[in-house]
Image (cartoon, rainbow, N blue to C red):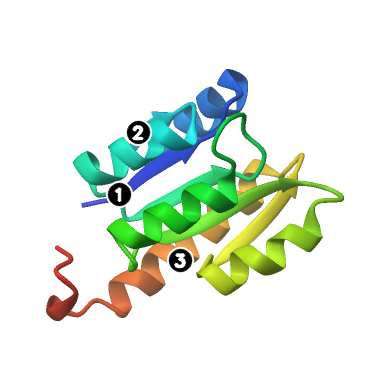
Amino acid sequence: MKAKLLVVDDQMGVRRLLYEAFSIEGYEVEMAASGHEALEKVKLAMPDLILMDMKMPGMNGLQTLQEIKKINDAVVVIMMTAYGELEIVADAVKLGIKEYVTKPFDINELREIVKKLVIKQEVDFTPALGKR
C-alpha cells in the first residue's frame, strides 16, 4: 500500500500538479488550501507525508507545522519555499521538517525525495509509534 500524502498550498495550480503527479504514482493524495484546512486533514486522514508551502495567507507554513507536530509528531514534512525564504527554513528544520524544496521545483526531483522519505519511514516503522 502506498503512503498517504497531504499537499498544502494556497495556489490551486500547485495543488493540482502535485495531486496528479503523486496520484499517478499510486499515492493516496489529499489537498488543503490553507493551514487551518491542513490541520483538519491531519486529524482526519492521518497522512504519512505532508508537502507544505511556507507562504500562505492566514496561518503560514511554520505556524501550521508547529500545530501539526502537536497532533502527530511522527509525520514527515517537506516544506516548499520560494527562493529567498531560506532563512525561515532553519526554523522549520528545528521544528522537524525532513526536507525542503525551493520553488519552482523539478517534479521528478520531488518525486525522488518523497520516495526516499517514504521508504525510510517504512524502514523506521515501529509499532510503538501507533503507525500502521
Q: Nearer the viewer, mark 3 or mark 2?
A: 2
Query: Which of the labelled discs sits on residue 47, or is there none?
Result: 1
Query: What residue is pinned by disc 2?
Result: 30
Dividing the picture into quarters, in which one does residue 56 lie?
top right
- Tell me which label, 3 or 2, sits earlier in the chain: 2
The location of residue 61, given as percent across then percent down, is: 57, 46
Q: Neighbour class for label 1 at 10 Å: few (<14), some, many (≥20)?
A: many
Please indicate whether residue 7 sits to the left or right of residue 39 in the image: right
Q: Are marks 3 and 2 in contact (CB under 8 Å)?
A: no
Q: Are marks 2 and 1 in contact (CB under 8 Å)?
A: yes
Q: Amino acid at mark 1?
A: Pro
Q: Residue furthest right?
A: 84
Q: Is residue 23 visible?
A: no
For the point 64% across and 42% down, which residue is it? 107
Judged from the image, the secondary structure of the residue bearing numbered disc 1 is loop
The location of residue 2, given as percent across then percent down, is: 28, 51
Q: Neighbour class for label 2 at 10 Å: few (<14), some, many (≥20)?
A: some
Judged from the image, the secondary structure of the residue bearing numbered disc 3 is helix
Q: Are marks 3 and 1 in contact (CB under 8 Å)?
A: no
Depicted 96 relative to depicted 103: above or below: below
Q: Is residue 57 visible?
A: yes
